[in-house]
Image (cartoon, helix red, strand yellow):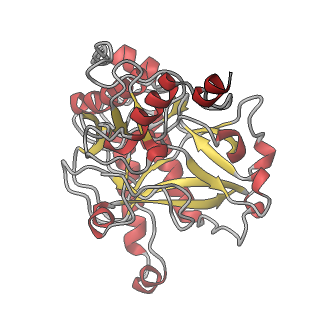
Amino acid sequence: MADVMRRSRPVDAAPPVARAREAIYEAVVCDTCGSGERGDELLLCDRCDRGRHTFCLRPIAAKVPIGPWFCSDCAPPVKRFKSFPMEQAKIIDFFRIQNDDQDGEPAKCRLSQDVRRRRKSSLVMHKKRRRLLPFVPTEDRATRLKQMASLATALASSNAEFSNELTYVTHMAPRSSNLARFEEGGIQVLHKEDKQTMELCRTMQQRGQCPPLLVVFDSREGFTVQADANIKDMTFIAEFAGDVDYLENRENDDCDCLMTLLLTADPSQRLVISPDKRGNISRFMSGINNHTPDGKKKQNVKCVRYDIDGESHVLLVACRDIACGEKLYCDYNGQENAYPTHHFL
């Protein structure tokens, strides 16, 4: 009996197989970068047990996924997304265009009138405050259909519906929670003329005249947005649209493009916009890595929160001239640095 007790192991010790498995997991490194650091962001394939960092994947994974995960070698073939048909009737139905503008003349006339009114303003006023400019839609109808079809393709592939505004869904944050006066430290009020510019852009979009943008698929970044024409500094691009929810409800969310809507003193009342079910082109704009000088240089769109009729809204505005073919990058963090972007491309 003494000999048996001497050779036995404690009851709380892990069995040999478990100890061996634990040793294997401790030795796992990322197949891409070769590092075993940042273990909390290291994914293990459920089939081959090889590792990949979330930020080494292409496209990058926003967080550790819930449930089984398979590396690119073990995962089943990914079904190629299907391009949205370049058919006018289907595009009108998808975007719920109210009055399709055949030649674009009415909106162009309103746009030129707006520009003339701005030119009459004094130079002193321009020095005091930079005003928003309305986007200039592409004149060629076929090109506009191509632009809208690219967005419809990205939304359909993401199982999302088109929405150009904030939506309030049952069991999420009610509209009454989105009051700009709750913003800690206050929030800037959108000027009357800028509000008119935004409304003009909304009207154009309702008539089928969209910003000159294309949604393209990048193997490293996923769906991205690029300019399909030159865009001037201070041009209104879009309002960040999606479902409004409390931040605490989204702490474990897999959505990779949450946007801060309202920062309140009470953390339980803070709001975010989630475009995973409903959204517009803002959902596919890439975020910059705001921890590196090269990342910051990429930014050509700024996200600005405004008080519009007492509610908080996020507007995407060009922060410099954007050349045709250039990708659009914005800073998801703004000033609060709420999101980790140190692994963004």
- Residue nearest the viewer, comparing 344 with 43: 43
- Residue nearest the viewer, comparing 89 with 324: 324
In this rendering, the answer to whether 88 lies above or below 214 is: above
- Report the residue that reaches farthest toward the bottom: 124
In this rendering, the answer to whether 197 lies above or below 185 is: above
- In this image, 321 relative to 13: left or right? left
Q: Position of residue 16 (x, y in %)?
A: 50, 25
- Residue nearest the viewer, comparing 298 with 204: 298
Residue at image coords 27%, 63%: 321
Q: Position of residue 124 (x, y in %)?
A: 44, 86
Q: Position of residue 255 (x, y in %)?
A: 52, 36
- In this image, 31 relative to 315: left or right? left
Decide if residue 204 is in sight here.
Answer: no
- In this image, 195 relative to 267: left or right? left
Residue at image coords 74%, 50%: 178
| Quarter of image, res 235 | bottom left
In this rendering, the answer to whether 203 lies above or below 303 is: above
Quarter of the figure with the N terminus: top right
| Quarter of image, res 152 | top left
Q: Position of residue 106 (x, y in %)?
A: 38, 41
Residue at image coords 39%, 21%: 157
- Residue nearest the viewer, comparing 200 with 135: 135
| Quarter of image, res 137 | top left
